[in-house]
Amino acid sequence: QVQLVESGGGLVQPGGSLRLSCAASGSIFSIYAMGWYRQAPGKQRESVATITRGGSTNYAESVKGRFTISRDNAKNTVYLQMNSLKPEDTAVYYCNAGGTYYSGTDFNSWGQGTQVTVSS
């Protein structure tokens, strides 16, 4: 079982910044990809940013140039630095990790979500 614990959400004014963190724990042999997704009220969950173990990144068009994803492989942790936040960034942000257990079984796990609210 993999546990993903997110932190760093909150209320911020438009133009402000937040940094989300997500730490993975459990019998993890390797995590291939980690990412952040978000779901706004009444909308489907969407990919925000993903990063591979080697550091290759992918961003949603709506956040390019404002958000930066990074990871610390030694700590099994992924971060999302969010700058120039807009009201439309308001959503519950979920962490995702895919990898392999020591047993050789693959996993794909989600965090519990953290609320980000951008409002004046």
Image (spheres, rainbow, N blue to C red):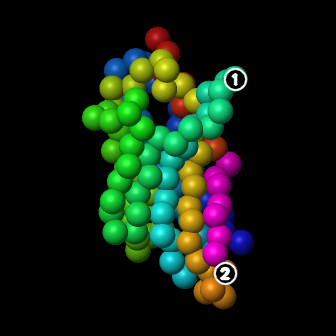
Q: What secondary structure is found at the residue carrying circle 2?
A: loop
**Quadrant the N terminus occupies:** bottom right
Count of residue discs: 2
Graded by Cα atoms within 10 Å as few (under 14), some (14 to 19) or many (20 or more), the crowding at tag 1 reads: few
Residue of label 2: 105
Q: Position of residue 35 (x, y in %)?
A: 49, 53
Q: What secondary structure is found at the residue carrying circle 1?
A: loop
Identified at 34% across, 69% down, the residue is 54
Quadrant of res 4: bottom right
In the depicted view, which residue is nearer to us: 66 or 18?
A: 66
Identified at 33% across, 36% down, the residue is 64
Residue of label 1: 42
Identified at 66% across, 81% down, the residue is 105
Amino acid at circle 2: Thr
Amino acid at circle 1: Gly
Q: Position of residue 47 (x, y in %)?
A: 52, 42
Q: As drawn, is 53 to the left or to the right of 112?
A: left
Give yes or no for residue 107 being in the magenta stretch: yes
